[in-house]
Image (cartoon, coloured by chain):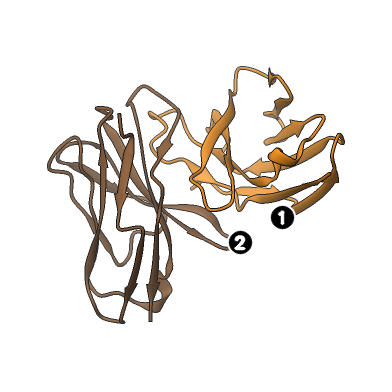
Amino acid sequence: NAGVTQTPKFQVLKTGQSMTLQCAQDMNHEYMSWYRQDPGMGLRLIHYSVGAGITDQGEVPNGYNVSRSTTEDFPLRLLSAAPSQTSVYFCASRLTQGEKLFFGSGTQLSVL
Amino acid sequence: GENVEQHPSTLSVQEGDSAVIKCTYSDSASNYFPWYKQELGKRPQLIIDIRSNVGEKKDQRIAVTLNKTAKHFSLHITETQPEDSAVYFCAASRPISFQKLVFGTGTRLLVSP
């Protein structure tokens, strides 16, 4: 198993550009989520999904969209990037009845 | 919603010493409290967790204690080693399938040889 795979690893955007961060898992996990990590602020939940077709907001959802068309994939979309979205983004998944979160390797995003 | 506070933000110890990291939570309905370790440039990984029906849990050199009345829980690392150097995050969530896991702000632990 590859586990949780995130692409790209690094990305630089200009303010106003759009992009999609990709996340895929091959462990048949129903639950998937996106976190952003900022210095001194820990990991903050952006959006999460408990299964295909079901998504919900976390603590900091503004400026981000998600969809879940398959069990394996959970992309995160930035429609109009802002400097405040400069961060490291982690995708994480787990079984519905499980507790342990499996994290991807992260995407370092810079918005200029 | 839940709010998790974590202290200290940085902790420096000598190899062989013990290290303690403390977290407080605000939501009395939270019942699951994991700890994640993140080495430099790596992804967070679960190292130990505890549910609210247990007061203490140990796994070799690490242990977690929970005080539900005071709404705080702590991570204890004994006989620290240089490879314990990392950022440690506590977290808390309610029982509803642990959908919204709220993390603390992290503690950077440095273990000097």
Q: Is residue B57 left or right of residue A67?
A: right
Q: Which residue is drawn at 58% across and 30% down?
A: B47
* In contact (CB < 8 Å): disc 2 and disc 1: yes
Amino acid type indicated by mark 2: Gly
In the displayed structure, B59 sits above or below A72; it is above
Tell me the crowding category of disc 2: few under 14, some 14 to 19, or many 20 or more residues within 10 angstroms, Cα based.
Answer: few
| Residue B24 location (% of width, % of height) | 67, 42
Q: Which chain is brown?
A: A
Residue under numbered circle 2:
A40
**Label 2 secondary element:** loop
> Which quarter shows the N terminus of chain A?
top left
> Which quarter shows the C terminus of chain A?
bottom left
Query: Which of the chains bears the disc numbered 2?
Result: A
User: Could you say which disc has been placed on residue B9 in the image?
Assistant: 1
In the displayed structure, B38 sits above or below A8; it is above
Q: Which image quarter: residue B79?
A: top right
Q: Which residue is drawn at 45% across and 29% down?
A: A100
| Residue B63 location (% of width, % of height) | 71, 25
